[in-house]
Image (tube, rainbow, N blue to C red):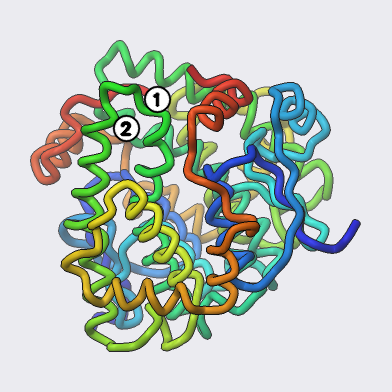
Amino acid sequence: MSGKPRLTYVNGRGRMESIRWLLSAAGVEFEEIFLETREQLLKLCQDGSLLFHQLPLVEIDGMKLVQCRAILSYIAGKYNLYGKDLKERALIDMYVEGISDLMQLILVFPFSPPAAKEENLATIAEKATERYFPVFEKVLKQHGQDFLVGNRFSWADVQLMEAILAVEEKVPSVLSGFPQLQAFKTKMSNMPTIKKFLQPGSPRKPPPDEHYVATVKKIFKLN
Amino acid sequence: MAAKPVLYYFNGRGKMESIRWLLAAAGVEVFRTGQVPMVEIDGMKLVQTRAILNYIAGKYNLYGKDLKERALIDMYVGGTDDLMGFLLSFPFLSAEDKVKQCAFVVEKATSRYFPAYEKVLKDHGQDFLVGNRLSWADIHLLEAILMLEEKKSDALSGFPLLQAFKKRISSIPTIKKFLAPGSKRKPISDDKYVETVRRVLRMYYDVKPH
């Protein structure tokens, strides 16, 4: 055992990508296991590795952690990306939860039937520009600081950066009208650990394609 | 500024119920008025159920003693949250879909979630899920158990440790008080609740089962 965290998932973004982002932003190297068959998933269920028979699984510090939020909260706490006290943590939680509602739309998008894709894309664009991005634009404008919470880099910044880039892949002009978020995106891109993550060869996974969707459907027996 | 937390929601369970549970278990009195899960507490207006619950758990020492215990609590709460999440839309379903959803939730509870918590209790043999001490995870699990039992009264048959757990946690004074008539605990969502939510949010008119 190398001592590095070990991530078990499918070879693609899905629910593991936020975890890859956060570990990378914290400068933490990790190993990855990619499942390709349903048998591999069932084996993990049978050997007790998956508390609720679900992925993602992250093995870290002697624990077999499941549940994205639990994993992300642990990483944030361990690497000082969770604010300095309970109140800052509450703000970070609030922002992260808000963003994850938007990320959920992006997560399920590749699995929507072809007929619904155009409508779902419009929904993503609408929710981003009318509900979520205005909130963060306002937060940044009001305190005038570089980071969302406590004038210090935190999990909230990483999550927002991930969301911005994910939406931009689908709606390239989505940040027009959000000057604070544009500046935020530039600043985040230049942070050394994030810059490295955004370069080729990093653990960052490409946008979901048909092969990824087919693999997920096969492994998790979705229709 | 009110010293007691103020809860903004509908007069029903929904996403606010877990918050009422946790505040009650911590012995915190609340006022309530109005609209969407929002809690005014310690000078903050907190939205997002999970952010609110995390804050309350941390503030009232129900979140473990260190990062690792917190991770376990988060993991267990994640499971009960998913389970109870299957029931959030229940009041808005048609009668026929309610039957289907009920069967679905009971199956998930008895084949996936209850076995997991039964094993946790069995493996360490302690009274509480994490760190041999009452935590948010215990309160959330009790809430989930009672919700499931409302749908299937013998949902815990086959889970002796969970049965003992249920009795034990229910008899903790603050929780016992919450479970008694006259507390802030909300009844099962009825047609009036459904009508109110639909009218105010203008949503949930055509809800499909999971």
Distance Cα–Cα, label 2 vs label 1 = 9 Å
Residue A212 figure quarter: top right
What chain letter is assigned to the residue under label 1?
A: B
Which percent across, then down, holds residue A72? 58, 60
| Residue B172 vertical position relative to residue B203 in the rendered view, above or below | below
**Between residues B194 and A156, which one lies in front from this camera angle?**
A156
In this view, the residue farthest toward the top is B96
Q: Which residue is found at the position 46% from the left and 38% from the top?
A: B84
Q: Which residue is mark 2?
A: B89
Q: Which residue is found at the position 32% from the left and 32% from the top?
A: B89
| Residue A221 vertical position relative to residue A34 in the rendered view, above or below | above
**Between residues A179 and A157, which one lies in front from this camera angle?**
A179
Q: Which residue is mark 1?
A: B210
Residue A182 figure quarter: bottom left
In-image side of B28 versus A7 (left or right): left
Report the label total: 2
Instruction: Estimate how packed mark 2 is, as few (under 14), some (14 to 19) or many (20 or more) residues with alpha carbons within 10 Å.
Output: some
Instruction: Estimate how packed mark 1 is, as few (under 14), some (14 to 19) or many (20 or more) residues with alpha carbons within 10 Å.
Output: few
In-image side of B138 versus A159 (left or right): right
| Mark 2 and mark 1 residues within 8 Å of each other at the beta carbon | yes
**Between residues A87 and A67, which one lies in front from this camera angle?**
A67
Q: Secondary structure at mark 1?
A: loop
| Residue A183 vertical position relative to residue B11 in the rendered view, above or below | below
Q: Disc 2 residue type?
A: Ser
In-image side of A10 versus B120 (left or right): left
Which percent across, then down, holds residue A191? 52, 79
